[in-house]
Image (cartoon, rainbow, N blue to C red):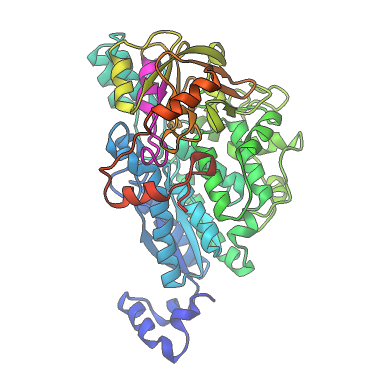
Amino acid sequence: MNSDKIKKGVEACPKRSLLKAMGYTNSQIAKPLIGIVNSYNEVVPGHMHLKDIARAVKDGVLSAQGTPMEFNVIGVCDGLAMGHAGMKYSLSSREVIADSIECMAMAHAFDALVFIPNCDKIVPAMLMVAARINVPSIFVSGGPMLSLNDGKTNLDLNSAFEAVGSYMNKSIDEDELMRIEQSCCPTCGSCSGMFTANSMNCLSEALGMALSGNGSIPAVYSKRLVLAKTAGEMIMDILKKDIRPKDIMTKEAFMNALTVDMALGCSTNSVLHLMAIANEAEVSMDLNMVNTISSRTPNLCKLAPAGPYHMQDLDAAGGVYKVISELCKKNLINENVMTCTTKTMKQNLEEFHPYVTRSDVIRPIEEPYSDKGGIAVLFGSLAPNGSVVKRSAVSAEMMKHRGPARVFDCEEDACSAIYSGKIQKGDVVVIRYEGPAGGPGMREMLNPTSAIAGMGLDKHVALITDGRFSGATRGAAIGHVSDEAASKGPIAYVVEGDFISIDIPNNKLDLDVESSVMEQRKKTMVIKKKDDLKGYIARYAKSVSSADKGAIVR
């Protein structure tokens, strides 16, 4: 066993004494040492209950004759970090989480790991480091928050963000604003729509690193604890058979994950994170692959923000594995891939029997919402290296659009213009210097997109940025523009009034400016730099790659 490094032989006497100082017995030390990687904290609603999940995992490990040893990692709440300097630390925290787990796992020679993530950056960070250190691993999330139906609509966190815009637009009053505030986040768990956290927890199933139900079982359901206990038991079987993350996260597994991504209509952030995970797994992946898979994968789900349904509805309809089973009807899934059950995807599907299915939530593949997947990558003169849009959340009116640019060099200035009524129907809002290096940290633009939606402009106004979006964003929101402004990408040279052409069906994003004019602008316009950066974020800005490469730290 890997843990023999710290417990076998005369030389390990000091190490055993340290373990015994923790209260471990000789028999416990002799068993496989299983690291329980828990992102519990008292700051994030998605993580507040993870002590209970960890306890259930430990019960499973103990019943299967292992010794669980828990340690914790940080977790940033994007909702709390949104709209201020804190958001610079959201995406960048992904690398901190991955690196800190690597430190703990390598220093303490665990035989296997059970990962307990829940929110946006924690899931991909843990998948990244699982591939990097490549010891037997399994994932079990804390599960999604419930959505509350208040008799008017199904509420979620995005309801609150959009309510701010509606209040500013005087379409709702303060009482209605407070009603939404009090009701939209009713339980623990990751925010209830197909936002980034739930997207990544669902894709953990599709990758084969998590058990069926990991992405969809609500946090407050007792079967979430059953899933956690099962994962704790399963890790011992994975260890016995020596199945490692790179045995599971193969090229074929990533193709499966992208396919499920398109069928579910996941967050645009999923593309960024899958790129980063693939890099750690030493699997080649680029943005062109996203369009290839999207072009052949029907969109089967319209989960919030794209539609009225939430994660509890997806679970009731059969969850991720029901989606996978539909995709298998047209041979869109490689069923021969290995999974964390120690069985192939095909074997898992043979054992999968949902108690209830709902064709209104998961469409039969013969009757999809659309023939193409939920995400599109757009290329063109404004985004030569690509940009990403959640196609399934774009209204029909905005699938093709041409309008004048309204240019802002930060999110705050754009929000001020939107709230003050300076953005008009037909405009294309451009927010730049918010990329991985230029932000730094590639802030999410949920505030401006929610403001646009809340003020009733989402069918008339597009937003383009080298930053990124929350999974809760809806509308013609095109992010991850590469190269970014700080790297002298074309978006740096857009000026007020330039016309921008958006053609989502044909994967095009163009700046309608003559090349000679652009060349002149490059000679005269100064690239802005943030010289006041300190600490970790300054180091991050110097080493992070572009969005089209997954915003990985090199």
The picture places residue 513, in percent across and down from the top left corner, at 52, 18
In this view, the residue farthest toward the bottom is 10
> Is residue 234 toward the left or the right of residue 533 in the image?
right
Q: Is residue 328 magenta?
A: no
Nearer to me, 56 or 380: 380
Q: Is residue 436 magenta?
A: yes
The magenta-colored residue range is 430-454
How many numbered markers are drawn? Answer: 0
The picture places residue 148, in percent across and down from the top left corner, at 39, 26
Nearer to me, 535 or 190: 535
**Relative to residue 505, is residue 253 depicted above or below?**
below
Nearer to me, 1 or 226: 1
- The residue at the point 33 percent across, 76 percent down is 23
Q: Residue 274's image quarter?
A: top right
- The residue at the point 46 percent across, 24 percent down is 520
The picture places residue 216, in percent across and down from the top left corner, at 51, 39
Q: Residue 356's image quarter?
A: top right
- The residue at the point 54 percent across, 33 percent down is 266
Quarter of the picture containing the N terminus is bottom right
- The residue at the point 56 percent across, 63 percent down is 136
Nearer to me, 536 or 122: 536
The picture places residue 485, in percent across and down from the top left corner, at 43, 33
